[in-house]
Image: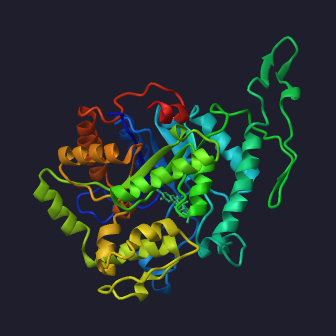
């Protein structure tokens, strides 16, 4: 069986601060996440992916209360400086930061991403997001979030421009010729003179070409338009999908779209979001799922979380009735997976089942979950998993259960990496 890839998805946010078995330190200097990255590197993860959003939501109940009370999606720090810290503290792990096309002028994003690729010696990846909430649009001077179609049209042009900026330095532009006192050869550094519908930029970039030429591109399109965007540009696609059948459909669909765009689908890795709930015995894991992830507080936080992703106030719907079929200009993919349309489940059931953000329920011992993950990958066809903690609340305990319990069980089965053999993130993703 072909091995699969592992990544971890986390914001630079609050940790599991109210878990009685966790340290209650504040994570804001980044050291918690630097240590986390080192643990992931010991466990041979391909990458850590840093989530980001650019507003404090007030969707749930029309107020920021639930978000601030639960420390949910807010507060959070900017992930880009953390990517630099992690890059300087690790040697092999890929470091992906979310950077929004709504927030950065393309030149700034290209320059920042190039710098982070230099600092990490070729291990940087960009999670391309268009930002999908009204509140974020308001923070950037817009009255309304542009419709999805237009956001992705803009992002297509944006990516075309930043690619040209990354290319504006030829690979051999830096000559460092002592005899002629030449650092860089001006004939090999070219303006891009980009004039688009939404963006224009003269260039060239004022950073040296970065080690990967351009950083690895990650994306998570969920809607048909978003999937087309991901299949056109991404080296690695991440997704929240509903069960093995949903995972298989998603992977086959983005691979077909990539082929239609003239790409080799095998050059793209698809990683599925999962939140394993582990215990020393099956009963202990099930009991933990019930105790930690089905309380009223969890249900409220799950609804608030999905509300902030989808711009839909789920507090308006009756918890014990079926959720009507909804659409959004926000994250449609998350809404579709959460809503399980046509299943007849009540909103409370949906919150318990989907609130952990796991594409598939993984509850058991490290050995049983490793077996399940192997079987799912066999069925889906590849390419790996992106671990997340329920409600994105990370503790050293949860991290250790995965890196020191689950990963060794996967390694014993030959299912995941046991060593790094490549130096850049893109090569690491393409190794198998
Ligand atoms: C695993 C995963 C990670 C994502 N990370 C972010 C993020 O950090 N910031 C963000 O604004 N959106 C993030 N998104 C949202 C996607 O960029 C995208 O908007 C979403 O999947 C919905 O797809 P659509 O835009 O095609 O509707 C993420 C989605 C998934 C599934």
User: Where residue 326 sits in the image (x, y, percent)?
Assistant: 48, 79
| 286 on left or right of 432 | left
Report the number of numbered marks. 0
Q: Describe residue 345's horizontal placement relative to residue 146 as left or right.
A: left
Residue 80 appears in the rendering:
no
Q: Quadrant of the N terminus?
A: top left
The answer to whether 398 is drawn above or below residue 144 in the figure is: above
Residue at 30% across / 66% down in the picture? Answer: 18
Residue sitting farthest toward the top: 179
Q: Residue at x 38, y 40 (%)?
A: 40
Q: Is residue 322 above or below residue 414?
A: below
* Image spot of residue 322 (x, y percent): 34, 83
Whether residue 365 is visible to the viewer of this picture, yes or no, is yes
From what the image shows, is residue 258 above or below residue 60?
above
Front-most of residues 237 and 70: 237
In which quadrant of the rendered image does the C terminus lie? top left
In the rendered structure, the answer to whether residue 180 lies left or right of residue 233 reads right
Instruction: State the residue at coordinates (13%, 55%).
Output: 282
Q: Residue at 48% x, 49% y: name it.
A: 49
**Left or right: 55, with 6 as reference point:** right
> How far across and down, in percent of the image, does residue 285 sit?
17, 57
Q: Nearer the viewer, residue 123 or 82?
A: 123
Task: Tell me where residue 337 sits by quadrant.
Answer: bottom left
Residue 335 x, y percent position in the rendering:
46, 71
């Amino acid at each position: 069986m072909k091995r699969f890839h592992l990544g971890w998805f986390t914001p630079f946010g609050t940790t599991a601060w109210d878990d009685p078995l966790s340290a209650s330190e504040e994570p804001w200097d980044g050291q918690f996440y630097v240590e986390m990255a080192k643990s992931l590197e010991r466990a041979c993860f391909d990458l850590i992916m840093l989530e980001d959003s650019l507003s404090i939501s007030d969707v749930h109940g029309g107020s920021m209360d639930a978000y601030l009370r639960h420390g949910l999606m807010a507060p959070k720090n900017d992930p880009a400086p953390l990517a630099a810290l992690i890059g300087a503290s690790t040697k092999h792990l890929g470091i992906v930061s979310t950077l929004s096309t709504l927030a950065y002028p393309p030149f700034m994003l290209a320059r920042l991403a190039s710098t982070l690729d230099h600092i990490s010696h070729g291990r940087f990846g960009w999670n391309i997001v268009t930002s999908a909430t009204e509140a974020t649009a308001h923070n950037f001077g817009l009255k309304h979030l542009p419709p999805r179609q237009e956001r992705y049209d803009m992002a297509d042009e944006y990516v075309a421009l930043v690619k040209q900026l990354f290319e504006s330095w030829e690979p051999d532009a830096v000559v460092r010729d002592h005899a002629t006192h030449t650092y860089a050869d001006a004939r090999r550094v070219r303006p891009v003179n980009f004039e688009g519908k939404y963006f224009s930029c003269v260039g060239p970039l004022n950073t040296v070409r970065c080690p990967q030429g351009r950083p690895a591109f990650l994306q998570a399109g969920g809607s048909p338009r978003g999937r087309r965007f991901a299949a056109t540009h991404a080296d690695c696609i991440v997704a929240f999908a509903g069960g093995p059948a949903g995972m298989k459909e998603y992977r086959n669909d983005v691979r077909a779209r990539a082929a239609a765009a003239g790409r080799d689908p095998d050059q793209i890795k698809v990683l599925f979001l999962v939140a394993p709930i582990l215990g020393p015995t099956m009963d202990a894991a099930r009991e933990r799922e019930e105790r930690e992830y089905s309380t009223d507080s969890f249900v409220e936080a799950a609804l608030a979380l999905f509300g902030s992703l989808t711009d839909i106030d789920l507090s308006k719907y009756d918890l014990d009735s079926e959720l009507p079929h909804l659409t959004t200009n926000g994250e449609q993919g998350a809404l579709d997976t959460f809503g399980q349309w046509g299943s007849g489940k009540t909103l409370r059931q949906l919150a318990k089942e989907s609130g952990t953000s796991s594409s598939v329920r993984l509850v058991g011992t490290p050995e049983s979950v490793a077996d399940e993950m192997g079987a799912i990958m066999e069925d889906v066809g590849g390419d790996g998993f992106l671990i997340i903690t329920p409600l994105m609340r990370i503790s050293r305990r949860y991290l250790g259960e995965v890196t020191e319990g689950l990963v060794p069980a996967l390694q014993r089965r030959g299912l995941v990496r046991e060593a790094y053999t490549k130096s850049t993130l893109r090569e690491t993703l393409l190794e198998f």
